[in-house]
Amino acid sequence: MKNLLIGLHLVIGFMIANPSHGLSQITNVSEFYQNRNVDAELWLNGKIIDLPNFKIGQPQKKIAVLYSHGTSNSFHGTGCKAPPKPEQWPRVMSFLKTKAIGNKNFLIFYLCSHSSEDNQTLGTLHIKRAEEIALAVRFITAHGIQSENIVIAGQSWGGWSSLYYAGKYKPKTLAILTFAPGIFGQEWYKSEQFSIIEEDIELFKKTNIEGLLFSHPRDYFFPTDPYHKFVSDVNGLTLVPDIHCSNVSDFWRHAYMFQKCSEKYNEFIFQYIKGRLQK
């Protein structure tokens, strides 16, 4: 058993560090690890993780936040901007890096996805990315941070993928934080997108998802109404309609959590995580 666990640990590291090698080459592991959809890498503190030498000092004193980025409207761009700069992810990520809860400090992981989707495979990208989240969570827990101390966060497509991860895998993570979550965008493939979104929502309703969903009421891609009205039907999930960023331009309404006005939510999010940790 000990040798098997060591083997799985090495497999996880190899896959995230070398996605181009293809998971089909991995043998003698569970079906999950053989999934060819996973194509991602993990970053920490502005650097891609050196997996063979990666260690977390005093993991019992860490809270991990695993952040997933959005993607382009063309479906072909990955959306990954690595290494991420402070302006390329929600401002609360930089805020949390400076905070601690008791003796626990935050580690902010950036999950850079290279997966894509086109109009021939609508509805597959968020499933692939949920698998990448699951793989990254397994990697983090293999290094000593318990799943109960992991926060899953995501913007736009990364946010919807985070919700789907929670619905499908039912993890025992600390919380889910999603910022303007959604897939496809308001004006593309309307009939197909509504069908897929509704199917996902039915999955969410069957799951307890402890988390916050941040939504700008006039988001061009995913306005609160109709896209985020389902939140009240999901156990544990709370809708937070924006009240601080009403003056941002049309372009930024979808990514208002990247703007300075969103810093007014920093303490609210921190206190939410603190409350979840103390339960």
Image: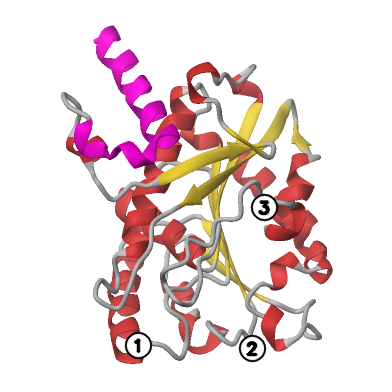
Q: Which residues are magenta?
A: 1-25
**Label 1 vs 2, first from the N-terminus:** 1
Q: Residue visible at 53% across and 82% down?
A: 222
**Residue 121, visible in the rendered structure:** yes
Gap between marks 2 and 3 measured at Cα: 25 Å
The percent position of residue 85, horizontal first and vertical second, equals 73, 52
Q: Judge depth for marks 1 and 2 and give the one in front.
A: 1
Gap between marks 1 and 2 measured at Cα: 20 Å
> Whole-Å distance between the Cαs marked 3 and 1?
36 Å
The disc at residue 189 is 1
Tell me residue 93's x, y (percent): 71, 50
Q: Earlier in the sequence, mark 2 or mark 3?
A: 2
Visible residue check, residue 170: no
- The x, y position of residue 28, in whole percent, is 16, 24
Q: Which residue in the protein does label 2 denote?
A: 218
Quarter-of-image position of residue 116: bottom left
Residue 29 belongs to magenta span: no
- Label 3 Cα crowd, 10 Å radius (few <14 / some 14-19 / many 20+): some
Type of secondary structure dominating the magenta stretch: helix
Q: The disc labelled 2 sits on which kind of residue?
A: Arg
Say whether marks 3 and 1 touch (CB < 8 Å): no
Q: Give the answer, above or below, for where 68 lies relative to 213.
A: above
